[in-house]
């Protein structure tokens, strides 16, 4: 192979003080190895990110775009939220289970919406302040969204299509496994700390990403 031959000749080129040939050869070898490295098969980030998570949403507190692919390999609880709902106190349990399981690969993703009962009238800044000041929410929250109509949230749209169930009120919950597959859903009446949910989370956390 020509590259190997050149490598064998490098000491001789130094000895003969053929510096221009030496530098030209070194440059050539460097370029060849760079091309070999670039052409070497690598795992594509697009391939490692489940289709369900291949989308972006604005972060609630500062409206900076966030790629959901950063949560690939985690067990995810997706929930639609509202600040003035009879179930708003579920923020407390959502934060508790997030804190309990986050180091094991679990995350809660919250999406405020005004779709049900007009119970989320505020803007993103107001919602963020409410979540932080009232419940100390630290799990990821995203900008105010809608779950119906032509501008419906694409993540929820996909979850509805895959599960055959859709939110009928605030604090509807979907559980997604480490492979990015929705495995179950729970209605607003089911608290995040309900044993059905925590048992499922613990089971899915034991699976390999």
Image (spheres, rainbow, N blue to C red):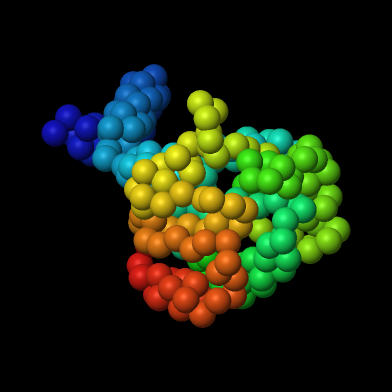
Front residue of 201/15: it is 201
Position above or below: 52 against 191: above
Front residue of 75/46: it is 75
- Most extreme residue toward the front is 117
Say whether residue 5 is left or right of residue 156.
left
Q: Is residue 47 visible?
A: yes
Q: Residue 31's quadrant in the figure?
A: top left
Position above or below: 26 against 140: above
Q: Residue at x 48, y 36 (%)?
A: 154
Q: Residue 89's quadrant in the figure?
A: bottom right
Q: Residue at x 65, y 52 (%)?
A: 81
Q: Residue at x 72, y 56 (%)?
A: 85
Position above or below: 60 against 163: above
Front residue of 178/10: it is 178
Position above or below: 57 against 199: above
Where is the C terminus found, in terms of image quarters?
A: bottom left
Q: Whole-percent x and y of residue 159?
A: 42, 47
Q: Whole-percent x and y of residue 197?
A: 49, 72
Q: Is residue 29 visible?
A: no
């Amino acid at each position: 192979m020509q590259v190997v031959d050149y490598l064998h000749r490098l000491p001789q080129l130094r000895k003969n003080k053929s510096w221009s040939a030496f530098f030209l050869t070194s440059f050539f070898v460097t370029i060849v190895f760079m091309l070999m490295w670039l052409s070497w098969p690598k795992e594509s980030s697009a391939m490692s990110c489940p289709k369900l998570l291949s989308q972006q949403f604005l972060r609630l507190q500062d409206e900076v775009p966030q790629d959901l692919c950063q949560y690939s390999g985690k067990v995810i609880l997706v929930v639609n939220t509202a600040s003035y709902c009879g179930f708003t106190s579920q923020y407390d349990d959502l934060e508790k289970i997030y804190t309990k399981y986050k180091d094991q690969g679990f995350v809660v993703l919250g999406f405020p919406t005004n779709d049900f009962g007009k119970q989320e009238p505020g803007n993103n800044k107001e919602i963020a302040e409410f979540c932080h000041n009232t419940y100390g929410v630290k799990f990821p929250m995203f900008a105010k969204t809608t779950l119906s109509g032509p501008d419906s949230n694409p993540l929820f749209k996909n979850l509805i299509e895959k599960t055959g169930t859709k939110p009928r009120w605030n604090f509807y919950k979907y559980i997604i496994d480490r492979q990015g597959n929705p495995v179950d859903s729970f209605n607003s009446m089911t608290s995040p700390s309900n044993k059905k949910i925590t048992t499922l989370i613990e089971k899915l956390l034991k699976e390999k990403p």
